[in-house]
Amino acid sequence: MPSYPFVAQLTQAEPNRRTVLMGMSAAVGLLGYATAASGFSGDQVKFFVGTYSSDTARGIYPLTYARSADSWTLGAPMPAIENVSYGTYDAQTKRYYLLNEKSDGRVAAYGRDWKTTGEVSSHGRDPCYISTDPTGGYVAVANYSSGNIAVYKTGTKGELIEPPVIRQNAGKGPKADRQEGPHAHWVQFHGDYIYSVDLGTDQVLGYGFNAATGAVGDAFVAYQAPAGSGPRHMAFHKDGTHAFIATELSSQVIALRKTTNGCFEAIQTLSALPSGFTGESFCAHILLNQAGDRLYVSNRGDNSIAVFTVAAGHLDLLQIAPTLGNWPRFFLLREDLKRVVVAHQRGNDLVVFEIKPDGTLQPKNQTVSVSQPVFIAAMA
């Protein structure tokens, strides 16, 4: 693991799509939840923070947690790696796959020394989500603005082999300012399928996938979300039967149950916002804990994380925890450390919470300043 000059120390907090989306809203892979083994080096646990590149944000920043001191330290940035809105790590190829979210989208493979083993086009505009095939050998990217996914085979050095398989969606939704066309916002491999979530068409799309050959089937509608809800991200339960969707435009969580032929049906819909909330807010990130009995969803606008209990696919609201910052686009869940770290895109900081035994979140009064953080992951 490379060493970094650590330059910015944790501060104490007071108790208390890029351009197209910034006016009204901001636009799990393996790195969304890091296992207990990831990032450990003795007393230190190492992470990195992805940012949107600007005059104040410079690529990705190393972040270190010292367990004995219960302190967080931000290191000097690696400015050559730009606009990292999402990423994943493949333990088989030993490569990080990171997105460069821009109009001519790019995706690159990096070794654990952070040297690139190849960068290619994402074959779409504004790539925003990436995942790897758990059986090995394939990477999928969701391109938001162009509404398509790209599925790549990986080479012997972990590089992405051109050309990928492209699946282009079409259609629109009722909210003209956000749903004028398809907007792929999430993609993951799951069993014999690849699934993508399209915010623009209110759909979860499925594609048959053969891991042995890499064959990707034509799209089918695995679930049609309510019109105008704008589904953003999806989380699969480990029971293999249930899944959960965070809707960006309606700020809801939809519980799904698997039916037949790779499809799902809705069994419950709950608001992710406090009762009586009347402002503007947009769901962002969604994660299940390892046990599958707690679900976490962030709200940009209300600036909170909703915590739900999960039992046999049924949700009950447990807590809505203020994130003490502005625009919580992403959060990292580390149950082994009993910590959640929230990335506030507009607040330009990371805020740390303790996970209590019941799964609720309690502020640690710890804040790390970093410009436009939109992703956090463990170093392998």
Image (spheres, rainbow, N blue to C red):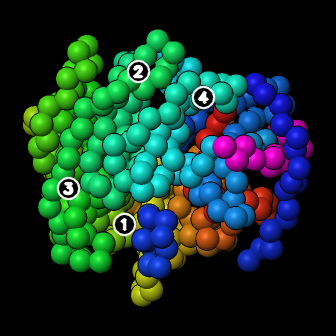
Look at the numbered disc 1 and give the secondary structure of its residue: loop
Pointers 2 and 3 in contact (C-beta within 8 Å): no
The amino acid pointed to by label 2 is: Thr
Q: Residue beneath label 4, please? A: 116
Using the image as rendered, state which of residue 362 and residue 343 is in the foreground.
343
In three-dimensional space, the C-alpha distance between marks 2 and 1, rounded to whole angstroms, equals 32 Å
In three-dimensional space, the C-alpha distance between marks 2 and 4, rounded to whole angstroms, equals 14 Å
The span picked out in magenta is: 66-80
Q: Residue 102 location in percent, x, y? A: 47, 55
- Residue at 20% x, 47% y: name it: 168
Q: How many marks?
A: 4
Mark 2 surroundings: few (<14), some (14-19) or many (≥20) residues within 10 A:
some
Pointers 3 and 4 in contact (C-beta within 8 Å): no
In three-dimensional space, the C-alpha distance between marks 1 and 4, rounded to whole angstroms, equals 33 Å
Using the image as rendered, state which of residue 94 and residue 15 is in the foreground.
94
In the image, is residue 143 above or below residue 240?
A: below
The amino acid pointed to by label 3 is: Gln
Quarter of the view holding residue 242: top left
Q: Residue beneath label 3, please? A: 203
The amino acid pointed to by label 4 is: Thr
Can you tell which mark lies on residue 248?
1
Q: Residue beneath label 2, please? A: 154
Q: Is residue 86 magenta?
A: no
Q: Quadrant of the C terminus?
A: top right
In three-dimensional space, the C-alpha distance between marks 2 and 3, rounded to whole angstroms, equals 28 Å
Look at the numbered disc 4 and give the secondary structure of its residue: strand
Sequence-earlier tag: 1 or 4: 4
Look at the numbered disc 2 and give the secondary structure of its residue: strand
